[in-house]
Image (spheres, helix red, strand yellow):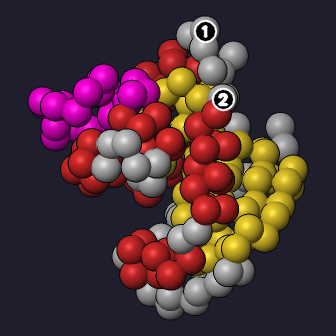
Amino acid sequence: MRKVIASTYMTLDGRMDDLQEWTAPHDSEAVARFHDDVLADCDGLILGRRTYEVFAVIWPARAGRLAYGDKINELPKYVASGTLTNLEWENSHLIDGDVAAAVTALKEQPGKDLVVYGGHALTQTLMSHDLIDEYRILLHPVLLGKGRSFFADAGPRVDLELVDSAVISRGVTVLTYRPVR
């Protein structure tokens, strides 16, 4: 069975808004290697509408610049949205309706892992249905003090096991957790 890996940037206080404001000073070759590693055993992305709209502008325009960006452009993209009707970015597929059922079906298909990028609402939905098999968090040494939290206040309790950690550059720590089931 395929794994669903949630990969996200996060501040030390658990926030995920205004990414460009606080992630850019910490970009490095080590961060690019992190993304290469996340996508190495992946053959599909799961995106929410907002992340899809941002990625569909950013990544095609950056073709040829970063290996992981090229892989993002090539991979099948499964987009959870109740409002989008036309997906123009190469190899994009709409998940319309029951997101949990669609992701469960994707997990049951043969293939490699699926990576969820961004998507606060999408991640909350997947967490509430126990569909995330691994969390890979790029924890930044920033206290934002405002904005959306990666984890919902009313979300389900999820006990996690730390399976890897590394400080990669400029104080950015990669934390990899798996749910204890």
42 versus 172 height, above or below:
above
| Amino acid tagged 2 | Asp
Task: Work out which residue is located at the far top of the displayed protein and give it.
Answer: 110
Quarter occupied by residue 3: top right
The one nearer the camera, 131 or 41, is 41
Q: Residue at x 67, y 80 (%)?
A: 170
| Amino acid tagged 1 | Pro
Q: Is residue 104 visible?
A: no
Categorize mark 1 by other alpha carbons within 10 Å: few (<14), some (14-19), many (20+).
few
Tell me how far mark 1 sits from mark 2, CA to CA: 13 Å
Spot occupied by residue 149 in the image (x, y as percentages of width and height): 51, 71
Q: Is residue 21 left or right of residue 181?
A: left
Spot occupied by residue 115 in the image (x, y as percentages of width and height): 55, 38
Spot occupied by residue 117 in the image (x, y as percentages of width and height): 48, 48
Q: Is residue 95 magenta?
A: yes
SS at circle 2: loop
**Residue range highlighted in magenta:** 74-97
Spot occupied by residue 148 in the image (x, y as percentages of width and height): 44, 73
Pick the quarter of the image with the C terminus: top right
Q: Is residue 148 left or right of residue 52?
A: right
Categorize mark 2 by other alpha carbons within 10 Å: few (<14), some (14-19), many (20+).
some
Please tell me which of labels 1 and 2 falls first in the chain. 2
SS at circle 1: loop
Pick the quarter of the image with the N terminus: top right
Which residue in the protein does label 2 denote? 41
Q: Residue at x 78, y 70 (%)?
A: 167
Task: Work out which residue is located at the far front of the displayed protein and give it.
Answer: 64
Which residue in the protein does label 1 denote? 110
Q: Residue at x 66, y 29 (%)?
A: 41
The one nearer the camera, 128 or 3, is 3
